[in-house]
Amino acid sequence: MPEQAVFTRGSTMRHVLTMTAASATGLLTMFGVDMVDMYFLTLLGEQELAAAVGYAGTLIFFLVAVSIGLQIALGALVARSEGAHRRDLASRYCSSGLLFSLASSVVISFFGWLYLTELLQLLGASGVTLDYAVRYGSILLPNMPVLVLGMSMAAGVRAVGDARRSMWATIAGSLVNAVLDPIFIFAMGLGLEGAALASVVARTVVLCVAWHAIHVVHRLPRRISLQEFLADLRPLLKIATPAILTNLATPLGGSFVLRTMSQFGDSAVAGAAIMGRITPVAFCAIFALSSAVGPIIGQNAGAGRYDRVRSTLRDAMVFNVAYVMLVWLLLWLLGDAIVAAFSASAMAAELIRFYCNFLVGAFVFSGALFVANASFNNLHHPHWATGFNFGRALLGTIPAVYFGAQWYGAKGVMAGEALGAVAFGLLAVLAAFHLVNRLEKAHLALPPTPRPEGLLTERQPPL
């Protein structure tokens, strides 16, 4: 078992790079399989299939956003407890967090499945595209609790500093998905439904591998009583509520973008959906960075080491800028190859080239916002992350997309989405450093995580 509070010593840049690399490897395989899914579906020759995946994916992202908020709460509480050398408390919070994640995802998935058609219509889907999106979503939505629970377990493993095993949970699921995709889609002739079924099997694999890491290896979860679970809801919700609201801002903005893009036809939606699969692959390290710095900041904050918290933020921002510039160069060179690979034509091809040539660099500000939000969530200021994310969506993305569509059509929609994060990314970074400086100048260590009544200090047997 790794030693506790592993991030309170050693180079912060090394921790940032190690955690990011481990998380990015897992995300790369996961996002890469999503991109391959899209590639296989475009080979079927119907642009409506790509558009349908875009609509269904946007809807499913709402549930994923809730899941991420729950993971943030679980990871933050476990990391702080580890930093304070309270493995007993970390174990209890892990168990309560997993139960809460499962219960929440079951309820939300049920209502999403029940009103699937109406929700897709609200996003702008219609005709054949709507039918495809319903068929795709009706398979994936009931299986979402499996994914949410697996992701939450992986977050708990990361929080104790074991990024490698957390990574392998994602990699295992992605490899299974990659193998099953061509079998289900082409060999068995299942088409769109085959892609969805491959994802269902892959999610189950993620759950099994993550459970092995968190239960068998780290023995983190333990049996808890109903009274303990209810008592833990308060600290969980204190972080999860603003974190969920923070993450819901992104799919809310994305829904407006998709509905606006739907005015320009299925080809425009297909182009946006293709880039929606390529962008996470290209920026997997930035997405990984936001989750990687959380445990590092959390452990050092729990130990009162604000100098290391500031160093972690600085190192993360340097990595963010350097990585995005490299990706911009690569996508600029590969724009035409992407168009050819996905058989994009008409408006879809124009949008892909436009994004690769001119808009990639704006992701620096999104990355900055991701890192700043991770710091807010681990420094007892999750409401700041909520404010900045909703500010980006409501005051940045939505107005920029609306006026971009009016003035420049589909390209204006894409540009508005990319540029909507500029101001709020900059402000969030400044606020994050200001918060760390304020805490350090006051010589104020974070208050210890409240110890719920009745918590036993001795180690409890795992589930």
Image (cartoon, grey):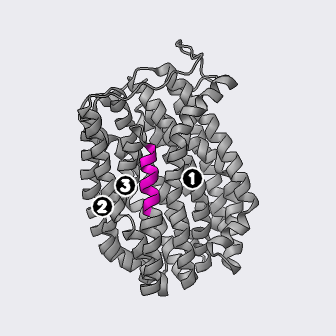
- Taking the spot 38% from the left edge, 34% from the top edge, the residue there is 298
Which amino acid, mark 3?
Leu
- Taking the spot 37% from the left edge, 55% from the top edge, the residue there is 369
Q: Distance of mark 2 from mark 3, alpha carbons? A: 14 Å
Contact? badges 2 and 1 (CB < 8 Å) = no
Question: Given this view, does label 1 or label 3 mark the residue nearer the observer?
Answer: 3
Helix, strand or loop at mark 3: helix
Q: Distance of mark 1 from mark 3, alpha carbons? A: 18 Å
- The earlier-in-sequence mark between 2 and 1 is 1
Q: Distance of mark 2 from mark 1, alpha carbons? A: 24 Å
Residue 345 in sight from this viewpoint = no
The image quarter in which residue 180 lies? bottom right
Helix, strand or loop at mark 1: helix
Please determine whether, in this image, residue 422 is positioned above or below residue 400: above
Which amino acid, mark 1?
Val
* Magenta part of the chain: 382-392
Task: Answer left or right for 123 relative to 305.
Answer: right
The image quarter in which residue 4 lies? top left
- The earlier-in-sequence mark between 1 and 3 is 1
Residue bearing mark 1 = 64
Helix, strand or loop at mark 2: helix
Contact? badges 2 and 3 (CB < 8 Å) = no
Q: Say if the magenta span includes residue 391.
A: yes
Residue bearing mark 3 = 369
Residue 436, disc:
none
The secondary structure making up most of the magenta span is helix
Residue 360 placed where, x, y %?
34, 69
Residue 58 placed where, x, y %?
57, 64
